[in-house]
Image (tube, rainbow, N blue to C red):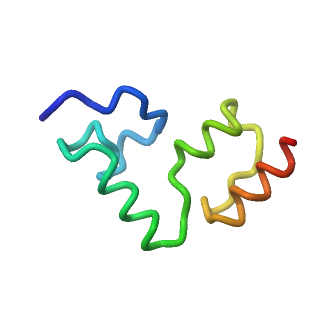
């Protein structure tokens, strides 16, 4: 397995798409999220690094709501 993606902020190490679990970088995670209409957790971690907001189901609307609440 190659070196994990160093900037990845995802804490779900059990997720099979997490870069620590394979050598394909972020591609599997991004592909899964695009297909599901979701935003990767790393984006949520940027706007809400302490995880204080209700992240819902990681949908695009959840991300937009958090961004607006944080403004």
Rendered location of residue 24, percent (x, y): 21, 47
Rendered location of residue 58, percent (x, y): 60, 59
Rendered location of residue 5, percent (x, y): 32, 32
- Report which quarter residue 30 is drawn in: bottom left
Q: Quadrant of the N terminus?
A: top left
- Report which quarter residue 29 is drawn in: bottom left
**Residue 11 or 62: which is nearer the viewer?**
62
Which residue is located at x 45 percent, y 67 percent? 34
Q: Does 71 appear above or below 55?
A: above
Is residue 30 left or right of 61 when viewed as pictured? left
Which residue is located at x 54 percent, y 47 percent? 41
Query: Looking at the image, which residue sits at the far left?
Result: 1
- Report which quarter residue 71 is drawn in: top right
Is residue 40 left or right of 3 when viewed as pictured? right
Total labels drawn: 0
Which residue is located at x 69 percent, y 39 percent? 47
Is residue 30 left or right of 27 when viewed as pictured? right
Rendered location of residue 35, percent (x, y): 42, 73
């Amino acid at each position: 397995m190659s070196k994990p993606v160093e900037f990845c902020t995802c804490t779900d190490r059990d997720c099979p798409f997490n870069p620590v679990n394979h050598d394909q970088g972020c591609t599997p995670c991004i592909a899964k999220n695009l297909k599901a209409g979701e935003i990767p957790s790393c984006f949520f971690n940027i706007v809400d690094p302490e995880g204080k907001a209700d992240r819902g189901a990681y949908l695009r609307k959840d991300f937009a709501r958090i961004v607006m609440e944080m403004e």
